[in-house]
Structure formats: C-alpha cells, structure tokens
Amino acid sequence: MTATFFGQFDLASLSLWLFWGFFALLIFYIQRENMREGYPLEDDDGRAAANQGLFPLPGDKTFRLPHGRGELTVPSGQNPDRTDLALEKTAAGNGFPFQPTGDPMVDGVGPASWAPRRDVPELDGHGHPKIVPMAATEHFVVAAGRDPRGLPVQAGDHEIVGRISDMWIDEPEQLVRYLEIELSAPWGAGKRLVPMTFARIKSDRVKIRSIFGKHFAGVPQHASPRQVTLLEEDKIAGYYAGGTLYASEERLEPQLG
C-alpha cells in the first residue's frame, strides 16, 4: 500500500489555477454587466465607433421597476442619447472640443448639458416622491442656521430678481435640495428652483453667482408645484452650471485666481 491516489499531482497548484480561472470569468461577467448602458460606443458624429473594445455586448436583461413603474430592458431599451445638439466641430478629427452654435444655456450643451432621464420624480422606499416643498409637509422645521424664506435673491450681476418662497426637502436624506424663488415681474414670472449648492445664504439676501438677472426667466420650470422629476432636475442643474461659464463673455476668457 505504498501508492497514493494523486501520485505527484499538486493540489495547491490546481487550487491556484482554479482561482485565477474564476477571477478571469468574474471580470468578464462584471465588465459585460457594466455595458448595459452607454454601449455600443459611438464616435463624435454619432456613428458606431470602430473600436468597440474587447468585450461583446451582453444579452438583454429585463428589470421589474418598483412601485408600479413597469419594466426596463437593457441594453436595447436604454434611454436614447440626445442627437439635436447645437454644436459644431473645431477640428476634423475626433477628440477635439466642440463649440456651441446657439445659446448654450438654452440648448443644454457644454457645462449646461443634461441627460434625457425619465420624466418622473425620484421615489423613496415607500413609493413617495423624495423631494417635496416644506409647504407640503409638516415633518420639517428649520432648527439651525438661517431660514432663507423671505430673503431677496441677488443674481451674479447684483440685480435683485425675487424672493425665496420655500425650501424643497429631500425627506429620506433630511436635507435641503432646492430653494424656491418667486420671481419679480421684470425678471420673469412664476417660480423657479435653484439647487442648494448654487446658492449662498447671507444674513440679508441669498446670492446666486452663476447666472445674471436676465437669465432667471430662462431657468427650466418644474411642471408640478409639489414635485420635481429626474429630467427637470437635470435641466435645472445644467442651466445654473452652464451659467458659470456662459453667463458672460468675460467668463469665457482665461481666469487667474
């Protein structure tokens, strides 16, 4: 009984090679799952790119969306990209910057760009809109810091364009996402939202540096007074972000800090 079952077979080496094989398959699987949105790759003109990469597209997978929002099949059912962009090339080859051909803040290009997200509000775990105005809920009060409601709104050119009429709260996260502005007559009509990150609350005013008084009438509006959709959020944020560069021609020039 001197013979052994495995003889000179190295079990440690087998275990190592099995691990490397599993790891390679895991990377292959994860990379293909990562390609369910944004693929196949396109060049600057919207045509299929010549180099699609090492990994093939995954097969369709259907996800059942919560709270009765239907189903989503990807990659074939992914949101289509925007194709009506007011941009033109600055060079013949790919990879060079594009320049706007119209009003970039209105056209939503460059820093003002937005993605075609679903035109529905983001929901919490119970199926209710996450972001709601304080006027629509009794669960929140301003417990610390300055309450901006009623303060005048000062644009980047120092014009007073209206007053803060409400704050929009992310209920699950318990923080302020937007300030609501009631515009004065010379600067537009109705209400507009400004992301909290673009506003600076002072003791006597709320300062919004990124855009000027003349731009507030063009801020994308939200359709419902009680909720804001994912698409509306993207357009609103893109407009204020675009103003950081495009609100004035002086901002297009190199800046020394």
Image (cartoon, rainbow, N blue to C red):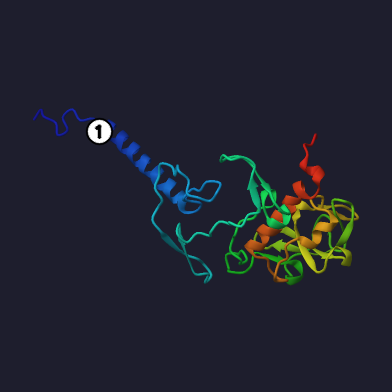
Residue 115 position, x and y percent, is 61, 56
Whether 210 is drawn above or below 233: the answer is above
Residue at image coords 58%, 40%: 92
Q: In the depicted view, which residue is nearer to us: 190 or 109?
A: 109
Residue 148 position, x and y percent, is 84, 59
Q: Is residue 173 left or right of residue 167?
A: left
Whether 55 is drawn above or below 161: the answer is above
Whether 129 is drawn above or below 55: the answer is below
- For mark 1, what is the residue? 11
Image quarter of residue 4: top left
Quarter that holds the C terminus? top right
Residue at image coords 37%, 40%: 24
Q: In the depicted view, which residue is nearer to us: 229 or 97?
A: 97
Q: Amino acid at mark 1?
A: Leu
Q: Is residue 120 left or right of residue 196?
A: left
Residue 12 position, x and y percent, is 28, 32
Q: Is residue 14 left or right of residue 143?
A: left
Residue 179 is at least partly visible in this image: no
